[in-house]
Image (spheres, grey):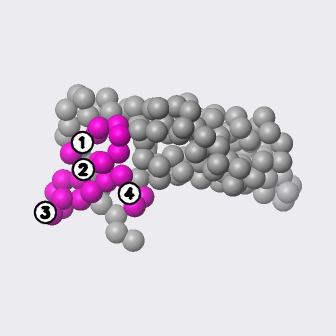
Amino acid sequence: MFVLEYKLRGKPSQYQAIDQAIRTVQFVRNKCLRYWEDNKGVGQKDVYKYVTQLRSQYPFVQDLNSTACQQACERTWTAILRFYNNCKNKIAGKKGYPKYSKRTHSVEFKKSGWKLNRNSKRITFTDGKNIGE
């Protein structure tokens, strides 16, 4: 795996766009969790399909890269599975019921939504949030 870490020196508009992207990821996670709570017997594929519905329903979710939305959904489903496994294995104490996200600090772009410049000193985000370079 190839991991790069960058220190951001951006403009106020870029910081604002990053904050909007983080809030959008938080919104997607909380909506997926609410969908799971309201509909009994919902599986992982149903939750992923719900994310595509969210993308068509809310324009600010459409602006975020699709892999970042799917990653938020995947993390939500991981929390749900952890809760089910703790209940199944009869773990003592709290079972870890999935909670709504209040303080999200990251957006995860896996393979798309960004582009590395030739000299590897700059990264350009290519999603609709206009984070820029």
Give the residues in magenta: 110-133
Label 3: how many residues lie within 10 Å, few (<14), some (14-19) or many (20+)? Answer: few
Residue tagged by mark 1?
Answer: 132
In this rendering, the label closer to the viewer, 3 or 4: 4
Whether residue 81 can be seen here: yes
Residue tagged by mark 2?
Answer: 124
Whichever of callouts 2 and 1 sits on the residue coming sooner in the sequence is 2
Distance from label 3 to label 2 (Cα)? 12 Å
- Indicate the amino acid at tag 3: Asn
Q: Is residue 78 magenta?
A: no
The residue tagged with tag 4: helix, strand or loop? loop
Label 4: how many residues lie within 10 Å, few (<14), some (14-19) or many (20+)? Answer: few
- Indicate the amino acid at tag 2: Thr
Whichever of callouts 1 and 4 sits on the residue coming sooner in the sequence is 4
- Indicate the amino acid at tag 1: Gly
Whether residue 105 can be seen here: no
Q: Which mark is residue 112?
A: 4
Residue tagged by mark 3?
Answer: 119
Distance from label 3 to label 4 (Cα)? 19 Å
Whichever of callouts 1 and 3 sits on the residue coming sooner in the sequence is 3
Label 1: how many residues lie within 10 Å, few (<14), some (14-19) or many (20+)? Answer: some
Tag 2 near tag 1, CB within 8 Å: yes
